[in-house]
């Protein structure tokens, strides 16, 4: 897996998704997007987070995958919904087949808005059933996770990774 190219998103707190539907030779960062979906094997998708949610989407049937950065703003803009819509349109993914995993992210009372709950709501509204929330707040566990807010901006970033064997 060390030799798989790493594809990352610029992460601008928007709702644009990059679609990768052909083989990729080398790693790169895609500008202006907050998520990447692909049906290609042996590439790694990467998203950096420190309080925002990394949302892993796996379609074991087609197969296809998606990895999305969804914080407060991206969630309001429906970035995860957009990724699912694009996976359906481009790869023929069916929402009931999709497995979704939410990474640890900042939650109330450490943050005003429970955007993880909103992401789950949005997924359910699209007909997804296999939704898993880590249920872990990053700001509650700064010994284990980076938290931008709890550490007042002086922190690192975690790298979420997802790839198809
Ligand atoms: Zn907390």
Image: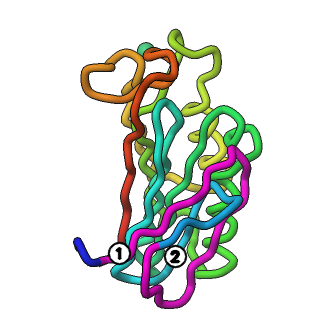
Image point 49% across, 81% down: which residue? 39
- Indicate whether 160 appears above or below 8: above
Q: Give the percent coordinates (x, y) of residue 103.
A: 41, 41
- Rendered image: mark on residue 20: none
Magenta stretch, residue numbers: 4-27
Q: Nearer the viewer, residue 125 or 134?
A: 134
The tag earlier along the polypeptide, 2 or 1, is: 2
- Majority secondary structure of magenta residues: loop
Residue 23 covered by magenta stretch: yes
Structural distance between the alpha carbons of marks 2 and 1:
9 Å
Position of residue 94 in the picture relative to residue 5 (left or right):
right
Q: Is residue 136 above or below residue 26?
A: above
Front position in the image: 102 or 43: 43
Asked if disc 2 and disc 1 are in contact, CB closer than 8 Å, the reply is yes
Q: Which residue is at the far front?
A: 154
- Number of numbered tags placed on the structure image: 2
Q: Quadrant of the image for the N terminus?
A: bottom left
- The residue identified by callout 2 is 38
């Amino acid at each position: 897996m060390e030799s798989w190219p790493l594809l990352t998103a610029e992460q601008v707190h928007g709702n644009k998704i990059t679609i990768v539907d052909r083989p990729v030779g080398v790693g790169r960062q895609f500008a202006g997007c907050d998520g990447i979906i692909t049906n290609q094997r042996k590439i790694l998708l990467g998203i950096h987070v420190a309080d925002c949610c990394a949302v892993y989407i796996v379609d074991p049937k087609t197969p296809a995958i998606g990895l999305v950065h969804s914080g407060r703003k991206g969630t309001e803009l429906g970035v995860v919904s957009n990724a699912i819509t694009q996976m359906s349109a481009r790869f023929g993914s069916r929402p009931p087949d999709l497995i979704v995993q939410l990474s640890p992210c900042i939650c109330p009372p450490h943050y005003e808005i429970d955007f993880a709950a909103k992401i789950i709501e949005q997924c359910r509204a699209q007909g997804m059933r296999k939704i898993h929330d880590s249920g872990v707040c990053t700001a509650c566990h700064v010994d284990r996770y980076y938290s931008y807010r709890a550490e007042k901006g002086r922190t690192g970033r975690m790298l979420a990774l997802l790839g198809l064997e």
